[in-house]
Image: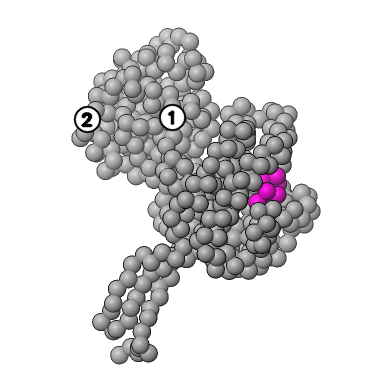
């Protein structure tokens, strides 16, 4: 399989050879014109549409294995590709072709007293590695973003989407071959052996940046063992604070969207905070509104006092650790707070820096929430589900970074570049 697979599922993988080939391919990609890289995008998008049946057939095998293993419905949903989702992936790739190419951009420039003309120019990172779980769309998204920005990429997906990933990489490899580009520009580690990940983390001789996308355990493993600079994120313990001034009906719609539109997403609501002055009227209506969707409420003692006999919806007391948990399901925590200050303190203690929202009609509350909340994306009267590369107009994303250095939030094209200083002189020397 080109695109390029190395090894068998249980066989050996020569990561050093993959890294060396990726570095060579990255030099070819970096030299391509913007028009050529855009042709890669349109060719890939067309191929995803053309080979949709093969990709969906492979995905059906992964879904069947997930059902056989007893995987929960919400987690299985993360694996699922259907016609609509695959068409959405292809559409995102097409959008990339229309976006400005950051590579080669002159970020700034000036004439120095020494006579030098100095500038900063955007350049590709070089070789990117992505280690990810569950979602097969990552294979297409990361590959497309890397190719658009002149980076080679080494992919290592999870066993849950092994068949889907291989099918997608076949399509990507065929596109590279069609355009006479090096197959090592996109390589897939065709092994589910976990020891391969440990070896990949030591491939700093060839890989310039590592992006883990998965659960907390994967992120911890990468942070503690990687020799490669990493971009972590995607762990989303997201909050919505419903202020006492918020419009109840509109707020319920936002909460519904944040929790139900895709419960397994990292930008889905996990904890709802409600101002105590609104709790008596708001919480019974919340329970009635969310019940038809099959939601489960995990109530703090303060919230439970306002819902002594909730009807039609399942409830549990909040347990230790629940506030720090990604439910990735239709469960979410509900807690009543004294005021905005208490809400901000709760978010500081339990948030992961992903996405946080406030529902309010009070501009002072909105302003303070934005000023004092530390997260990659903040929303005033909007759902946290908007934290997404496509929704932000980035075309797609390689990850949602919750770090503060290099990139933050949805990582699009610019996040896959760095820069170099270039100075022009007239045989200049330093005094």
Q: Which residue is drawn at 41% across and 50% down?
A: 408
Give me the disc on residue 299.
none
Hey, which quadrant is residue 85 in on the image?
top right
Q: In this view, does 47 lie above or below 71?
A: below
Q: Earlier in the sequence, mark 1 or mark 2?
A: 1
Within-10-Å neighbours for mark 2: few <14, some 14–19, many 20+? few
Q: In this view, does 271 lie above or below 106?
A: above
Q: Any magenta on residue 351?
A: no
Q: Position of residue 76 (x, y in %)?
A: 63, 31
Q: From the viewer's perspective, is 7 left or right of 409?
A: right
- Name the chief secondary structure element in magenta: helix
- The stretch in magenta equals 166-173
Secondary structure under tag 1 reads: helix
Q: Position of residue 214 (x, y in %)?
A: 57, 43
Q: Which residue is drawn at 62% across and 28% down?
A: 72
Q: Name the residue under label 2.
A: 362
Q: Which residue is drawn at 39% across and 32% down?
A: 383
- Disc 1 and disc 2 in contact, CB within 8 angstroms: no
Q: Name the residue under label 1.
A: 258
Q: Is residue 352 visible?
A: no
According to the image, what is the colour scheme of the structure? one colour
Secondary structure under tag 2 reads: loop
Q: Any magenta on residue 169?
A: yes
Q: Position of residue 190 (x, y in %)?
A: 72, 51
Within-10-Å neighbours for mark 1: few <14, some 14–19, many 20+? many
Q: Is residue 216 above or below residue 105?
A: above
Q: In this view of the protein, which residue sits in the foreground, 388 or 73?
A: 388
Q: Can residue 362 be seen in this view?
A: yes
């Amino acid at each position: 399989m080109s695109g390029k697979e190395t090894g068998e599922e249980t066989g050996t993988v020569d990561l050093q050879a993959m890294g060396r080939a990726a570095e060579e391919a990255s030099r070819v990609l970096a030299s391509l014109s913007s028009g050529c890289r855009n042709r890669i995008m349109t060719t890939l998008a067309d191929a995803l549409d053309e080979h949709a049946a093969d990709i969906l057939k492979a995905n059906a095998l992964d879904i069947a294995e997930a059902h056989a293993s007893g995987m929960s419905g919400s987690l299985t949903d993360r694996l699922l590709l259907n016609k609509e989702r695959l068409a959405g992936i292809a559409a995102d790739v097409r959008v990339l072709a229309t976006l400005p190419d950051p590579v080669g951009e002159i970020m700034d420039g000036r004439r120095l007293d020494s006579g030098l003309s100095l500038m900063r120019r955007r350049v590709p990172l070089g070789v990117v590695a992505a280690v990810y779980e569950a979602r097969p769309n990552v294979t297409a998204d990361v590959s497309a973003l890397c190719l658009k920005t002149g980076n080679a990429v080494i992919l290592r997906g999870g066993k849950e989407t092994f068949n889907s990933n291989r099918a997608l990489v076949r399509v990507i490899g065929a596109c590279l071959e069609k355009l006479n580009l090096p197959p090592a520009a996109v390589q897939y580690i065709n092994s589910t052996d976990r020891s391969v990940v440990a070896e990949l983390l030591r491939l700093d001789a060839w890989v310039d940046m590592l992006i883990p996308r998965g659960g907390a355990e994967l992120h911890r493993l990468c942070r503690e063992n990687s020799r490669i600079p990493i971009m972590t994120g995607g762990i989303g313990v997201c909050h919505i604070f419903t202020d006492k001034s918020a419009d109840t009906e509109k707020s319920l719609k936002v909460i519904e969207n944040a929790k139900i539109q895709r419960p397994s997403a990292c930008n889905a609501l996990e904890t709802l905070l409600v101002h105590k002055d609104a709790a008596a009227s708001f919480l019974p209506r919340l329970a009635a509104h969310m019940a038809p969707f099959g939601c489960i409420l995990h109530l703090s003692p303060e919230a439970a006092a306002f819902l002594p006999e909730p009807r039609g919806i399942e409830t549990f007391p909040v347990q230790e650790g629940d506030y720090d948990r990604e439910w990735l399901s239709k469960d979410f925590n509900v807690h009543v707070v004294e005021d905005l200050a208490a809400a901000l303190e709760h978010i500081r203690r339990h948030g992961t820096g992903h996405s946080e929202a406030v529902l309010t009609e009070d501009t002072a509350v909105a302003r303070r929430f934005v000023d004092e909340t530390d997260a990659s994306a903040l929303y005033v009267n909007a759902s946290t589900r908007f934290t997404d590369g496509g929704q932000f107009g980035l075309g797609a994303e390689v990850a949602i970074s919750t770090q503060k250095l290099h990139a933050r939030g949805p990582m699009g094209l610019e996040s896959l570049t760095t820069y170099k200083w270039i100075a022009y002189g007239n045989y200049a020397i330093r005094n």
